[in-house]
């Protein structure tokens, strides 16, 4: 069984496209992805996703009743009807995920997905070379690197994943996580990396948007995993309000006292900002709008 390779894009007119690959590459790709599937399925226990629980190494998160509104299953069942990928850098920037899949013995379609990082684009900008037969050769045309692990699987309406933060870069999962409660907000404000502020005063600024962002930031663990100096450097790059203060001998993130700057900070911490590695242009991911002075 040879697997086909598809891309899920943000382009509404070409939501799903197919890579036309040679037979030898398809065979190797199939073996490569099936090995990843085996590793992905090693989790011993499935945990229903609630937006808060972080799985252990032998656990995996799942969402039951996920609606395949993009039609990934249809592409697997009828690959010949899917239009080919447009080999253009602008189009490649619209790719959100790579996926493949097959029909199981029970008749369901199992879909294997990889989040697509723009750094995986092999660009025609500049000169790209690869090593073969003891020499480096020029790469002709645009290309991609297929990652070494799966991000998620989807079968019979069950979406399984280890990282919600990564999976939601492929799918809109906003309906599946809960906004932060007052207790969640208080917990967020007690994180070591956050300035101590009046909790009840902060609640006055905590509308539903703020609470959703807090829930996502807590889920991602970015405050615990990314050093403050790296956050500061990125914030400077994007002109995002990001103040740190000394509190009891420790550097912490200052909390803005107005809702506008607070939302900019939370959006930044939720990593809605990125820099295109090809154009070196700053965007906000939910709109692809150019970032200007804040």
Image (cartoon, helix red, strand yellow):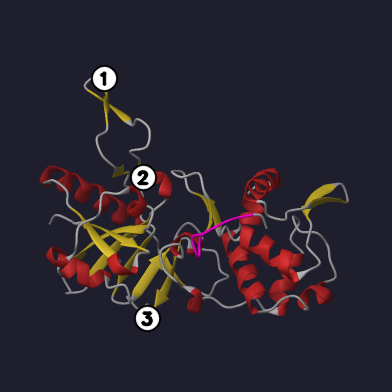
Q: Which residue is depicted at the point 49% across and 79% down? A: 175
On the image, which quarter does residue 189 sit in?
Answer: bottom right
In the picture provided, is 97 more to the left or to the right than 81? Answer: right
Viewer-side label of 3, 1: 1
Q: Which residue is depicted at the point 17% across and 44% down? A: 25
Q: What element carries label 3?
A: loop
In the picture provided, is 7 more to the left or to the right than 180? Answer: left
Where's residue 82, x and y in %?
18, 64
Q: What separation in Å lies between label 1 and label 2 (alpha carbons)?
A: 22 Å
Crowd tier of the residue under label 3, counting other residues whose Cα lies within 10 Å: few below 14, some 14–19, many 20 or above = few
Q: Is 93 inside the magenta-drawn segment?
A: no
Q: What separation in Å lies between label 3 and label 1 (alpha carbons)?
A: 51 Å
Where's residue 95, x and y in %?
35, 57
The mark nearer the N terminus, 3 or 2, is: 3
Instruction: List the residue tagged with mark 3.
Output: 65
Crowd tier of the residue under label 1, counting other residues whose Cα lies within 10 Å: few below 14, some 14–19, many 20 or above = few
Instruction: List the residue tagged with mark 2.
Output: 121
Q: Which is nearer the eye, 85 or 44?
A: 85
Instruction: List the residue tagged with mark 1.
Output: 135
Q: Is mark 2 on a helix, strand or loop?
A: strand
Residue bounds of the magenta highlight: 285-292
Q: Is residue 103 something one can see in this rendering?
A: no
Where's residue 219, x and y in %?
58, 64
Where's residue 3, x and y in %?
18, 56
The mark nearer the N terminus, 1 or 2, is: 2
Q: Is 289 inside the magenta-drawn segment?
A: yes
Image position of 82 with respect to 120: above or below: below
Assign the magenta stretch its main secondary structure: loop
Q: What element carries label 1?
A: strand
Q: Is residue 145 something one can see in this rendering?
A: yes
């Amino acid at each position: 069984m040879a697997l086909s390779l598809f891309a899920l894009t943000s382009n509404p007119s070409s939501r799903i496209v197919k890579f036309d690959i040679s037979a030898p590459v398809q065979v190797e790709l199939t073996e490569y992805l099936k090995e990843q599937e085996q590793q992905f399925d090693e989790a011993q226990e499935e945990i229903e996703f609630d937006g808060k629980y972080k799985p252990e190494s032998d656990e995996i998160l799942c969402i039951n009743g996920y609606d395949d509104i993009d039609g990934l299953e249809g592409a697997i069942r009828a690959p010949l009807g899917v239009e080919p990928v447009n080999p253009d850098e602008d189009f490649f920037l619209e790719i959100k995920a790579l996926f493949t899949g097959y029909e199981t013995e029970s008749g369901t379609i199992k879909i294997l997905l990889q989040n697509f990082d723009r750094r995986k684009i092999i660009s025609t900008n500049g000169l790209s070379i690869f090593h073969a037969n003891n020499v480096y050769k020029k790469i002709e045309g645009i290309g991609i690197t297929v990652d070494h692990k799966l991000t998620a699987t989807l079968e019979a309406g069950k979406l399984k994943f280890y990282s919600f933060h990564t999976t939601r870069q492929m799918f809109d999962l906003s309906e599946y996580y809960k906004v932060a409660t007052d207790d969640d907000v208080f917990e967020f404000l007690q994180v070591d990396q956050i300035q101590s502020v009046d909790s009840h005063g902060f609640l006055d600024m905590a509308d539903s948007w703020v609470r959703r962002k807090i829930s996502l930031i807590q889920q991602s663990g970015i405050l615990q995993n990314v050093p403050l100096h790296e956050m500061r450097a990125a914030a400077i790059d994007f002109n995002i309000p990001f103040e740190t203060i000394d509190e009891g001998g420790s550097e912490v993130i200052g909390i803005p006292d107005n809702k506008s700057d607070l939302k900019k900070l939370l959006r930044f911490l939720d990593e809605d900002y990125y820099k295109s590695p090809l154009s070196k242009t700053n965007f906000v991911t939910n709109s692809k709008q150019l970032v200007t002075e804040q």
